[in-house]
Image (tube, rainbow, N blue to C red):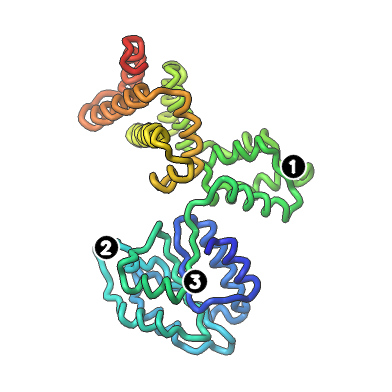
Amino acid sequence: MNAQAALKAIKGGQLASIYVILGTVDYLADQLKQQLLQVIPAEERTMNVGSYDMESTPVAVALDDAMSAPFFGERRLVFINHPYFLTGETKKNKLDHDLDALQTYFEHPEPDTILVLMAPYEKLDARKKLVKTLKKQATMVEVNQVSERETQAYVQAALQAKQITMAPDAFQELMSRTDGQLGLIMAQLPKLMIYAAQSQRIDLPAVDALVTRSLTQNVFNLVTDVLRYQTQSAVELYHDLVTAQEAPLKINAILLGQFRLLLQVKILERAGYSQGSLASTLKVHPYRVKLAMQTVRQFKLPALRAAYLGLLQTEVQMKTTQRDPELLFELFMVQFVNDRQRGVSA
């Protein structure tokens, strides 16, 4: 079940005994959590809502709460956070969790308790008995990566509630500056809506003025400069990032990641992969894949490969020498341009 369907069901009073909220999109997970909290009247929440982190609290404590009768109310709501024992993860300071008792609870949940497992992971370990039981007994709600269309739907719903519209180019710029991350987008909306309080419309200048570019977005622009052999523009942008206190190794690591993605997309797209299959195969946000596909169609594979290998060598030099990082980047650009002139990266 997706988040929208789950929210609709909860609002309509269709409640399950056990929920697993699985995925890494914090905004959607929080929306579900807040909607579930509405099930318990405000005056009863102190006594009938419990929240336990499995990285610091034994699961037996949460189960004791879940198996207790509601205190002067109809229902008890218990959140189990970070249930890492449902995944393949291992913890150094591993707690002694009574997983047999948890298995028994999954098989025979308390009728007056809503147990919610908040699992901020991409997937669970399907081989585990606990997970197999959960898939039979619980309502599984996925809050993993959302598409651009789904993101736009969430944004439009929030704006419609305030009777505000957004220009298409403003939405695209907002997507660009937040890397298409739903949580970041929704965090930017309040100030954009305040800006549009009188006009009732969010335009491109508003996004340009109020939403700062992320480091990833700046590096994406840097990637474009590199591939277009625009040495001066690339060096100036690199200098601006360093001046803004961004660590050179971090900048280079993101650059490498971007070029690795471009190479993967170029190769897999040639093999017939679609945008959706690329996103799931590479485990990358669909919006990043969309941008990568648009980029790689403008450039040849040798250029992408040469840039990646050059940046890899730059990283080695950053880690093993005392040379100035900005100078190393300039030398990379000079070598990259020379390779093109010699036909190496054309």
- Quadrant of the snapshot with the C terminus: top left
Residue type at mark 1 is: Arg
Residue type at mark 2 is: Thr
As drawn, 71 above or below 332: below
Q: Find disc 1 in the rendering and name its residue.
A: 201
Where in the figure is residue 5, as x and y percent of width and height? 59, 64
| Number of the label disc, if any, that sits on residue 139 | 3
Q: Residue at x 36, y 79 (%)?
A: 102
> Camera-side residue: 111 or 60?
111
Residue at disc 1, secondary structure: strand
Q: For the image shown, how many numbered marks are present on the structure?
A: 3
Residue 247: in sight, yes or no? Answer: no
Residue at disc 2, secondary structure: loop
Residue type at mark 3 is: Thr
Q: Residue at x 34, y 65 (%)?
A: 126
Dot 1: within a 10 Å radius of its alpha carbon, few (fewer than 14), some, or many (20 or more) residues?
some
Q: Residue at x 44, y 45 (%)?
A: 277
Q: Find disc 2 in the rendering and name its residue.
A: 90
Where in the figure is residue 123, as x and y percent of width and height? 39, 60
